[in-house]
Amino acid sequence: MCGRFIQDSPFPVLLQEFDLRSAEVEILPRYNIAPTQDVFAVINEDGNRLTRCRWGLIPPWAKDPAIGNRMINARAETVAEKPSFRRSFRNHRCLVVATGFYEWRKDEARKIPVYVHLKDTRPFGLAGLYSDWRSPEGQVIRTCTIITTETNRLLEPIHDRMPVIISREDRGLWLDPEVHDPRTLQPLLKPYPSEEMETWDVSTRVNSPANDGSELIKPVTGSE
């Protein structure tokens, strides 16, 4: 699964990396993004632009918005058929902007947090879906989920799932609002190449979403 990630790239870097429309937005570095918090995602609406979403997808038909708390991830293997996700999979795909994410490795009686990122440290887009939910009072809430797939060789000792990272060459296809066929989209939902990624152990302070700051992604050795 994917339950925590970071985004510390400044807007000019994201502007170039994702070919965004040049509209300034305030993006502060965050090192411990957790479910139900706001995240930034790239969508294609007359060109790529950033949109703010709450992490945890609320389907348009939902009566209770609390369902979003259980919809932080969607499995690549079933995302095209699941009632909660299939509409967004065909029509509302996005790239959740990240610079790295955390997984937890079991080590005897405890779990050790591990920071995962690209070796070249550039930001990347996690395969996501978004949805606009309207409350009975008329309030519109934009929410999203992150798609996961089977793990690659690097992360196999840590977890059996990983978030889907859409490669640079596939971003245009993934975001294309004219593409709706799951048979075209499904092949994009694959593990990212191990040789392009790097991991190291980090402090258990990341276990609490209340903690934030660049010190959370610094390598540690032993118990800390």
Image (cartoon, grey):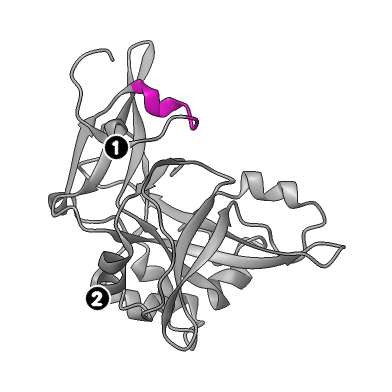
In the image, residue 117 lies in the stretch drawn in magenta: no
Task: Please state which amino acid type lies under the numbered disc 2.
Answer: Glu
Q: Which mark is on residue 89?
A: none
Q: Secondary structure at mark 1?
A: helix
| Span of residues in magenta | 204-210
Q: Is residue 153 visible?
A: yes
- Residue at 60% of width from left, 50% of height from top? 71
Task: Please state which amino acid type lies under the numbered disc 1.
Answer: Ser
Using the image as rendered, state which of residue 133 and residue 40 is in the foreground: 40
Query: Does residue 65 sit above or below 95 in this rendering?
Result: above
Q: Is residue 134 left or right of residue 206?
A: right
Using the image as rendered, state which of residue 189 and residue 167 is in the foreground: 167
Tally of numbered tags: 2
The residue that disc 2 covers is 169
- Residue at 25% of width from left, 73% of height from top? 16
Residue depth check, mark 2 versus mark 1: number of the one nearer the observer: 1
Q: Where in the figure is residue 60, as x and y percent of width and height?
A: 73, 66
Q: Say if mark 2 contacts mark 1, CB within 8 Å.
A: no
Q: Where in the figure is residue 65, as x and y percent of width and height?
A: 75, 52
- Residue at 50% of width from left, 84% of height from top? 45
Q: Where in the figure is residue 69, as x and y percent of width and height?
A: 64, 44
- Badge 1: few (under 14), some or many (20 or more) residues near its Cα, within 10 Å? few
> In the rendered image, which quarter is residue 201 located in?
top left
Q: Which mark is on residue 214?
A: 1
Q: Is residue 73 visible?
A: no
Q: Is residue 145 left or right of residue 70?
A: left
Using the image as rendered, state which of residue 120 and residue 80 is in the foreground: 120
Q: Secondary structure at mark 2?
A: helix
Q: Where in the figure is residue 1, as x and y percent of width and height?
A: 44, 43
> Where the C terminus falls, by quadrant?
top left
Using the image as rendered, state which of residue 41 and residue 60 is in the foreground: 41
Separation of residues labelled 2 and 1 (CA atoms): 30 Å
